[in-house]
Amino acid sequence: MPTDLLEVSSQLTESLIDPLALAATAGEAVLERVRGGRCYVVYCGHHEKSSSLAAVRLLRRKLHDARDDDGASYEASPLSGHSLSAGDAAWSSVTLGEDCGDDEFAAGCARFGYQLVAYSGLSPVGYCTFVVRVEDGFDEQAASIEIEVLEIWVVPHHRGVGVGASLAEAVAQLAVAGLVELEIRLSGAGVPTLFSFAIGADIHSSSGAHFLRKTTSFLREKIGDLSMIFAGGLQHVLFDDIELELR
């Protein structure tokens, strides 16, 4: 980390030195919902009785089988599953003094990400991969929270019953868990911080846009529910609104 960044290290940067704790680990059930008369469970990475490698192989096979139909549909888009990994289904990391290019630096940046897989019984029927980035600005740049949805996909004959909504709710649940830990850290330091807050994705279909809007709705709902944990809700992680970025 450059010396000049060390000299201007803020309370937020100091709060981001240690990686944010993960709210779920591989093989752990994150959310269970009954949709269309079926029970769907969203797992971190894979079903508890399966493995990440098995889940990734099955999902990529199903992606391949659905490619022609997805390519001809406005509702969905063909995906390659490039964000699927048989490795870490949940991870958290920190960088300090990150060079963002164009003479811009992030004094401190914490990231965490998850690979979520929705199951019907023992069969994977959809997945979502996403990353949350919490960044302390440098010079006049504001601190920021960004949620990037990398991929979202549901097996064709499980669409239209709320599997995507279950994945959207799980994304919001895990993202808000990160905000709660950040609130605790900043509360301990006594430093309220104003963030810009955005959620975005590269959108190639109407279902992708709907998923992002649904996730944003769940985020607002779950952040509002935090008043049951913190008196008055978040007091140190402050933002005006959640910006939706459909790219």
Image: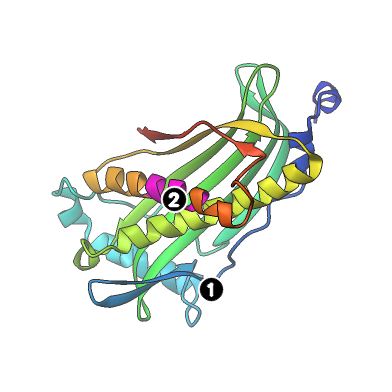
Q: Confirm or deny contact between disc 1 and disc 2 (CB under 8 A).
A: no
Residues 57 and 48: in front is 48
Query: What amino acid is labelled 2 in the image?
Result: Glu
Residue 143, image x, y percentages: 63, 29
Residue 85, image x, y percentages: 49, 59
Mark found first going from the N terminus, 1 or 2 = 1
Find numbered disc 2 in the image and state the secondary structure of the residue it sits on: helix
In the image, residue 127 above or below residue 175 = below
Query: What amino acid is labelled 1 in the image?
Result: Gly
Tell me the number on the disc at residue 221: 2
Quadrant in which residue 58 is drawn: bottom left
Quadrant in which residue 193 is drawn: top right
| Separation of marks 1 and 2 at Cα, in angstroms | 26 Å
Residue found 34% across the figure and 49% down from its top: 214
Q: Nearer the viewer, mark 1 or mark 2?
A: 2
In the image, residue 11 above or below residue 148 = above
In the image, residue 186 above or below residue 172 = above
Q: Is residue 100 left or right of residue 151?
A: right
> Label 1: which residue?
27
Residue 204, image x, y percentages: 27, 41
Residue found 48% across the figure and 53% down from its top: 222
Find numbered disc 1 in the image and state the secondary structure of the residue it sits on: loop
Task: Say how the picture is coloured.
Answer: rainbow
Q: Give the magenta part as a residue range.
A: 215-223
Residue 184 shows in the view: yes
Residue 103, image x, y percentages: 65, 16
Number of other residues with Cα within 10 Å of mark 1, as a class: few under 14, some 14 to 19, many 20 or more:
many
